[in-house]
Amino acid sequence: MAEFQVDKWTSLKVEEKGEWGFTLLEGWIGREGDFKPNFCKREFGRKDAKTEKTVPVGVKLGNGEMAVTVALWLLRELTGKEYAPVGEKAVQGKLDDQDVPF
């Protein structure tokens, strides 16, 4: 999927991760024009057996239907207006129909 340039140093990219659904990644564009994700350190595991890993900075959006619901929620938060996919009706942040609009 294509990248979106937020400013000189920040780009966003949506990746599809199979069964994990969609993820919104933060990164930057390299000299060759390729997307380079930013990384952060996170702790994983139980309290007594934590391990630290370096992972890309991202937000899990869920499957296709949930990703659309997240996008509609974000639009409402930013604009204060109600949005819905074409031909569908949004009710309290959830879609009425089970069909994904794409």
Image: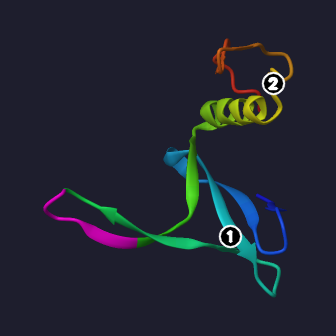
In the depicted structure, whether residue 14 falls above or below residue 35: above
Q: Residue at x 81, y 87 (%)?
A: 31
Q: Secondary structure at mark 1?
A: strand
Circle 2 or circle 1, nearest the eye: 1
Query: For this view, does 54 lie left or right of residue 81?
Result: left
Residue 17 position, x and y percent, is 56, 53
- Mark on residue 27? 1
Query: For this view, does 47 lie left or right of residue 13?
Result: left
- The mark that comes first in sequence, 2 or 1, is 1
| Nearer to the camera, 79 or 91 | 79
- Mark on residue 85? 2
Q: Residue at x 24, y 59 (%)?
A: 45
| Nearer to the camera, 50 or 31 | 50
In the depicted structure, whether residue 39 falls above or below residue 102: below
- Magenta highlight range: 47-53
In the depicted structure, whether residue 73 falls above or below residue 14: above
Please state, as top left, top right, bottom left or bottom right, where the N terminus lies in the image. Answer: bottom right
Query: For this view, does 74 lie left or right of residue 2?
Result: left
Near mark 1 (Cα within 10 A), the count class, few <14, some 14-19 or many ≥20, is: many
Query: For this view, does 4 lie left or right of residue 62?
Result: right
Residue 33 position, x and y percent, is 82, 79
Q: Residue at x 81, y 86 (%)?
A: 32
Near mark 2 (Cα within 10 A), the count class, few <14, some 14-19 or many ≥20, is: some
